[in-house]
Image (tube, rainbow, N blue to C red):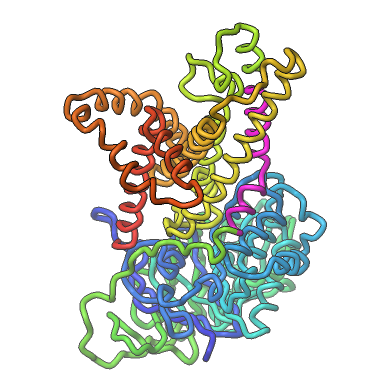
Amino acid sequence: MLRVIQAFGLTSVPRKDLPPAVDDVSFEARAGHVTALLGPQGAGKTTVLRLMLQLQQGRGITQFRGRPLHHVPHPSHEVGVLLGDVPGHPGRTVRGHLRMLCAAAGVSVRRADEVLEAVGLVSLREERLGTLSRGMDRRLGLACALLPGPHALVLDAPGDGLSAREARWLYDMLKAHAAQGGTVLLTMDDPKEAARTADHVITLEQGRVVADQDAQGFARTRLRPRVVVRTPHAARLAALLTKEARAAQRSVQVVQDSGNRLSVYGSSCAHVGETAFRHGVLVHQLADEVGDMGPDTADVALTVSAGAAMSESEQPAIERVAGADRLCRVGESGSDQPAGEKSRDTALPVVSPPSPLSLPRPTPHPESATPTAPAPQASPVRLPDLPPPIAVRPAPSPLRPLRYELRRAAGISTGFLTAGAVLLTSAVMALLLARVGHTPQERLLAAWPAELPLPPAALGAGLLGALAFGDEFRHPALAADRGTVPRRLGLLSAKLLVAAATALMLAFVTVGCDAEVLYLVYGREFVKVPGEWLSMGASWIGLVVGCAWAGVLAAGVFRSTTAGLAAVLAVPVVVVPVVHKAWEGASVRSAAGLPMRMRQVFLYQWPFGGERYLSAVARVIAQPVGGALTLSLTVLLCAYVLTTLRSRVR
């Protein structure tokens, strides 16, 4: 199948009374070619890409090798995307970031080293993302786009802010990808760079396609040769060149850019230099250039005709863009005419590729685009009023969620620092409680004074659980450009499993560390094993794991680490008093024997003494904190499922 990108009728949603940023944009990016969307800032280039990738609501359709993006099973394997800077936690290493994305894309971890070598970042693989320069960030962004081996690359202004050397390397990489049969679509605002880099150039102006040309046709019709002159006597030299051209009946166009700079079209360096020498005009610069589409400032254009015998169609038109890609035609009188008011014979044809869909205002693809060629007339057909709507699609879930979550959690130092702070705080607090005395053995080993709602280990587990989703929303490497994280149950299960394992390790290490410190300082009498160690251990594990899960679920529902930690603290502060008050109610007291009757019915039938473990679990849940934590987890899980279903419905 042909590797091609086809966009039909892309139209953004207008804001209030303003016109849409993109209006009926249709084009085609072919396999083996680098296609450039050219236009100044505000022309709608980024909006076009976001509509294509279903990151923004609007109308139209984009097909990648004949299929819309939401019909592609694994979009990252079809199209690699780079919009803006590389998203990711600034403390993560370059190699760790790519290895994490390997699990998300479902590719081998060896692929990370392959793309690092391809983009020249092998020597910086242990550098943190927050320390990378602009050029290295662009290289890493290209590595992330190439990681799953996509057929197409879609990049938004990849060369912005790069040096000439870095930009040339980047564009050479894109050309190499296209030479291997891939499709490359990128945006840029430099016409000369587009002519050098792209094989096909699509020019946008105010959200519309004003030209659809190959690179040679673009350079011939929109980039004209000119002579650039810098002189402190720009106005005088312009008048002299105008006078000599009129006397010689030659068509010369002199455009005064800004300050002391002149652009002379239709002449040569030798002629301009001789004129300046003959009249004693000081020249600071004199060079041949390929004319661009104009500076950002308004220009004063002086056009010299060969007299009345020269017809208007024989005079070359000046095509310039000032600010928002303003196209002008300068006539005999020297007045410039805006692109929106230019006559039919000078307008650049608005073209769109042929498509199986009927779209508003289609025009055939021109064989050759010239400034003076009239736009081909489209055959009248019956068209629908609006193209199909574009809905924002949810981000894809990682293909290997457990592997992804493990690499995400271990890739930064936040978890290790949090665990170290918990161990230190717990040990110091255990020593203080032992010194004060009158503290039960179980609370002493957990470093849990009665004045605190939760012990340090439970708070640390809740914080680590909240970071599982909080870091995703703050640094959305998994769902870049969407600002949200997939709510698939597979990803949730992976996060809950990793959070539970982390909480278990933290619980055991905290108790062991506290016991060792108490033994070293106060002796063996403070570290005796309690008689009911089984039920106490179950309560301790349930508390720490429950806090971790509460942090995960709350951060996933409210999209914030702070909200996740607040939900953990709300359990003993808010939920426990409510549950305790409800437990003391009359209706509850009347059913006080229900747990005992249920235990008598169900527990005695379990073999191998399983009723003891179930009884321990029941006693944990029957405690005020255990019951409140169970209730909170149930509510948060239901809220998470509801938000997941809501996002899928939309």
- In reply to whether residue 408 is colored magenta, the answer given is yes
x 41%, y 41%: residue: 554
Horizontal arrangement in the rendering, residue 385 relative to residue 357 (left or right): left
Q: Position of residue 175 (x, y in %)?
A: 67, 77
Is residue 274 visible in this depiction of the protein? no
Q: How many marks?
A: 0
Name the quadrant containing residue 578: top left
User: Is residue 187 or residue 67 the one in the foreground?
Assistant: 67
Stretch in magenta = 403-427
- In reply to whether residue 431 is colored magenta, the answer given is no
Name the quadrant containing residue 239: bottom right
Please identify the residue farthest to the right as the structure is shown: 123
Horizontal arrangement in the rendering, residue 460 relative to residue 587 (left or right): right
x 44%, y 53%: residue: 484
Magenta stretch: helix, strand or loop mostly: helix
Q: Position of residue 153 (x, y in %)?
A: 57, 72
